[in-house]
Amino acid sequence: MDENQIRYDDLPVIKPGIKRRRNLLPWWIIACIWLFLIFLAVVPVGVVFGLLNFDFQISLLGLSTNDPFSAIGLFLIALFIFKGITAFGLWTEKVWAVDVAKIDAIISLVICCLTMGYSLFARHTFTIRLELILIILYYLKMNNIEYDWKNFDYSEHAPPGDPDPVEIVN
């Protein structure tokens, strides 16, 4: 290959109408982002309730507890914090956000499958967690937009004279 030739697969994809990384996300992921940002804000309330020995219902991916300081409660609080950080990264358009979102989807998928397996073998009942559908779609969407997200060039989308938002956001 001649060194003067351009490799088109190395160039970022510029989609018309996409002015921000956030515009690569569908509405249902944006709704989940806001939901987990709210849950992240509620985590300190759950910790305070736990310190005051009040019951505080925590439930996610088939795991639930009334005690924030039980093993499951602490695990769920950590999971909510992780999901909140992931949501914050996606909302603020951080470059690392898609990688963390894919890890989040894989962790959620494993937890969901483990709770389904526990239900089958320990309780002898089988329940299909509907979250699995959203988690799989979430992972596939993050995988599909990963290249565009990481190679997004704000200078291609900004009007002339505007400062580079990458310097402000990152």
Image (cartoon, rainbow, N blue to C red):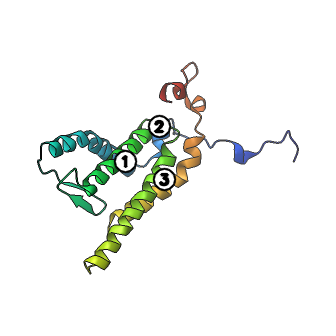
- Is 115 placed above or below 125 here? above
Image coordinates of residue 140 in percent, x first then y, are 49, 58
- Does 23 sit left or right of 112 as displayed? right
The image shows a total of numbered marks equal to 3
Provide the secondary structure element on which disc 3 rests.
helix
Nearer the observer: mark 2 or 1; the answer is 1
Residue 102 numbered tag: 3
Pick whichever of labels 1 and 3 is earlier in the sequence: 1
- Residue that label 2 marks: 93
Pick whichever of labels 2 and 1 is earlier in the sequence: 1
Residue sitting at the far top: 161
Q: Are marks 1 and 3 in contact (CB under 8 Å)?
A: no
Image coordinates of residue 82 in percent, x first then y, are 38, 46
Residue 15 visible in rendering? no
Q: Nearer the viewer, residue 76 or 71?
A: 71
Image coordinates of residue 10 in percent, x first then y, are 71, 44
Distance of mark 1 from mark 3, alpha carbons?
Answer: 11 Å
- Residue that label 1 marks: 83
- Does 9 sit left or right of 134 as displayed? right
Provide the secondary structure element on which disc 1 rests.
helix
> What's the residue at 48%, 43% (across, down)?
97
Q: Residues within 10 Å of mark 3 (few under 14, many from 20)?
A: many
